[in-house]
Image (cartoon, rainbow, N blue to C red):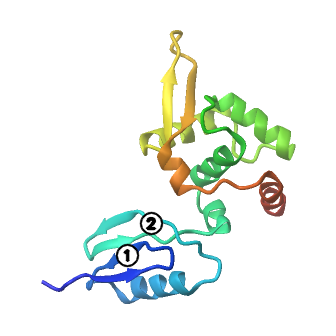
């Protein structure tokens, strides 16, 4: 069995690289390590049939353009306090207050994506006694995987994509 190679990043993070990486995976790794806009943080692992691959940190633009779930995660991270419980209705009201439009979807669509973020461990969830009201709170996983963006920068991103 071939031995894993290791790379130590400037911040001290050590990445183990499988010898079974495809050419495309090696190219993506080199590109991400030499890119000027990549910030080095501890990267999550993903198991594949080619060994362990470390997912590269994504730029804000890449996250925003990838999926509605990612857009919602960035929005929550940027506009809601870490210890604050919130509902899908509050997120919809906040997006309208900021953009004047519905960018992330109506309350039911937001509720669906909130539940998906809960299922992946990005949010904590609680139901109230009436069973109809569900609230969410940012988890440690969401804090580490999604950037918190200053409001001015976030508004610029939103306006450029509308």
Q: Which residue is drawn at the image coordinates 46% and 79% (left, top)?
A: 9
Question: Where residue 64 appears, x then y in whole percent?
Answer: 66, 60
The reply, left or right, for residue 96 in relation to residue 138 is: right
Residue 45: image quadrant is bottom left
The reply, left or right, for residue 40 in relation to residue 150 is: left
The reply, left or right, for residue 153 in relation to residue 115 is: right
- Could you tell me which quadrant the C terminus lies in? bottom right
Q: Label 2 near label 1: C-beta < 8 Å?
A: yes
Numbered badge on residue 116: none
Q: Residues within 10 Å of mark 1 (few under 14, many from 20)?
A: some
Q: Secondary structure at mark 2?
A: loop
Q: Nearer the viewer, residue 144 or 161?
A: 144
Q: Which residue is drawn at the image coordinates 57% and 68% (left, top)?
A: 58
Q: Earlier in the sequence, mark 1 or mark 2?
A: 1
Numbered badge on residue 43: 2
Q: Which residue is drawn at the image coordinates 17% and 86% (left, top)?
A: 2
Q: Which residue is drawn at the image coordinates 69% and 29% (left, top)?
A: 89
Question: Where residue 125 appears, x then y in whole percent?
Answer: 49, 30
In this rendering, is residue 51 above or below 142? below
Residue at which label 1 appears: 15
């Amino acid at each position: 069995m071939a031995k894993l190679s290791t790379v130590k990043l400037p911040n001290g993070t050590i990445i183990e690289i499988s010898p079974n990486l495809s050419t495309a995976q090696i190219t993506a790794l080199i590109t991400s390590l030499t890119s000027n806009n990549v910030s080095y943080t501890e990267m999550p692992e993903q198991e594949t049939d080619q060994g362990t691959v470390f997912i590269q940190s994504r730029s804000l633009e890449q996250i925003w353009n990838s999926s509605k779930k990612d857009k919602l995660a960035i929005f929550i991270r940027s506009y809601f306090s870490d210890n604050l419980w919130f509902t899908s209705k509050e997120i919809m009201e906040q997006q309208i207050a900021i953009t004047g439009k519905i960018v992330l979807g109506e309350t039911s669509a937001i509720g669906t994506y909130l539940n998906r973020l809960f299922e992946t461990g990005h949010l904590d969830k609680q139901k109230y006694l009436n069973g109809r009201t569900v609230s969410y709170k940012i988890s440690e996983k969401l804090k580490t995987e999604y950037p918190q963006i200053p409001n001015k920068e976030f508004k610029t991103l939103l306006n450029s994509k509308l």
